[in-house]
Amino acid sequence: MTVEFGNEISVAINSRIRAFNIALLESGISGIVETVPTYRSLMVHYDPGVIRYAALEQKLKGLLGGLDKVRIPPSEVLYGGEEGPDLPFVAEQGGRSVDEVIAIHSAPEYLIYMLGFTPGFTYLGGMDESIATPRLKTPRVKIPAGSVGIAGAQTGVYPIDSPGGWQLIGRTPVRMYAPEREKPILPEAGQYMKFYPIDRAEYDKIAEQEAAGTYVCKRHSREEGAE
Amino acid sequence: MSITVLHPGMLTTIQDQGRTGYQQFGVPVSGAVDPRSAAVANILAGNEEGEAVLECTVMGPQLRFDQPAVIAVTGADLGPTLDGVPMDNYRAVRVGAGQVLRFTGPKCGCRAFIAVAGGLDIPQVMGSRSTYMKAKIGGFHGRKLEKEDVLGLRAPGMEPKALATRSIAPEFRARAEYTLRVVPGPQDDAFTPAGMETFLTGVYTVTAEFDRMGCRLEGPEIAHKTSGDIISDGIAFGAIQVPSSGQPIVMLSDRQTTGGYTKIANVISADFRILGQLKSGDKVRFEKISLSAAQEALLAQRASLRLLRHVLDN
């Protein structure tokens, strides 16, 4: 079965296809053998011995209807301080106050363009150019897991302790990578991600829940018309 | 049916030829930093080239063999002894039950590789036995070896044929200055002609900041046209990143899958056997060669491994 989204090469169409592919793979619909996302469509290979065409079509239509409401892994972030030592520099560079930088950084829903660097490192596009800041001239030897950084007009989260050269503006207690988890890597390319400023008490609370394995990442709906 | 770790040494991990296929999710390849020496150790021990081996860094471990085994040690000369008696590098050696392999200290090079005939009984994670410590996957519980760890053997007692003649001359020799051959790119156009000249004529010293991920060098500052930043893209083994500081960083096995500093050149695959043996204080120079020459060197190296196996087995 092929689900067609359009007949052109466009970011908007391809984003919807990737989002639909993720939704489909997460849906647990039985009988799906494999999916093939392309520029313009999603090909769904299925086993008619498990699910018939009509039943599958109905389920896919249901998923399509809810597509704009799914999948934003949020990330609560403690901005500044020891967790975000470069926040003042980013603010100064952009001619903004620290509070303005936090407001600007936490406003958008960022498209996860790609994963790379280390397991689950999110490369996010769509950051406001006014807070864009070049990488450090000499990268740091060790950056703690959860650190939120800026590199040029990119932003992202370091999933594990590693060296790195991004300007650090805060830290999330949410674990992007946890090897013992059933799904070790939390974010997926094609999803959107949003940051929420939190205080130290909230940070500690989530960190405790993460350590105990009880934290549940609350998926948020994408705002209407957001891009 | 096992090997007991009496002392882990400085950093001993299980590595094979790497974990490919998962870089799109940000999972680094890992694997032996000197893949050639790891392959030679395996061939001497009668294994497939890609079998998992122990990679020992600078100060080797102390291992007790709880049953007879055949092993081969290659790469750096870290001074191996069996029950206190010096043992040859680059030779398949029979170890008796209860014997202890110790390393007395580094003589040359950085990383030694221990292959055990029949292979180590280690589960594969994403198709590889390589340890990636930062993400705690692969190898022995995703970490370096520690005291009292017990490593199982997959084929205890296995012996390769013609054991007595399974040896070659050690391949790595210490030098006052090492030359690494490089192919320029992919961001060689981000540097001024003078910057490129500096890179190709300067002598660089390995700093204390070197690990399985990368190796920071110090030397004449390499000038960019504008800056050392790009939109992040893929990073290959041996890539030489130059951030805005102008000081190069050579990427090794545990390198990040992608990164955003300009890469002036890439060390050729045939020279990873030198790259993987550098340690702090070593001096290196870079020599530019063509892509076709680099590929010929790699193919020649592969042919030499096939020839070695053929000679040892027949």
Image: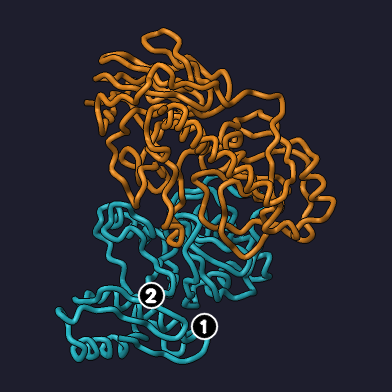
Mark 1 is surrounded, within 10 Å at the Cα level, by few (under 14), some (14 to 19) or many (20 or more) other residues, namely few
User: Is residue B145 placed above or below B293 in the rendered structure?
Assistant: above
Seen at 15% across and 79% down, the residue is: A50
Classify mark 2: residues with Cα within 10 Å, few (<14), some (14-19) or many (20+).
many
* Residue marked by disc 2: A72
Foreground label between 1 and 2: 1
Q: Amino acid at mark 2?
A: Ile
Rendered colour, chain A: cyan
Q: Tell me which colouring the rendered structure shows.
A: by chain
Which is more N-terminal, label 2 or label 1? 1
Measured as percent of width and height from the top left, residue B93 is found at 38, 18
Residue B248, given in percent of the width and then of the height, sits at 68, 45
Q: Between residue B82 and residue B48, name the one nearer to us.
A: B48
- Type of amino acid at the residue the image marks with label 1: Val
Q: Residue at x 26, y 73 (%)?
A: A33
| Relative vertical location of residue A27 with respect to residue A213 in this rendering, above or below | below
Residue B208 to residue B105: above or below? below
Q: CA distance from mark 1 to mark 2?
A: 18 Å
Would residue B53 appear left or right of B262 to someone viewing this image?
Answer: left
| Tint applied to chain B in the drawing | orange
Answer whether residue A171 is visible to the viewer in this image: no
At 20% from the left and 78% from the top, the residue drawn is A47
Q: Quadrant of the N terminus of chain B?
A: top left
Q: How many marks?
A: 2
Q: Is B63 left or right of A112, judged from the image as shown?
A: left
Residue B206 location, quadrant:
top right
Residue topped by disc 1: A11
- On the image, which quarter does residue B178 sit in? top right
For the residue pair A113 and B184, the one nearer the viewer reads as: B184
Co-location on one chain, circles 1 and 2? yes
Where in the figure is residue B131, as x and y percent of width and height? 39, 42
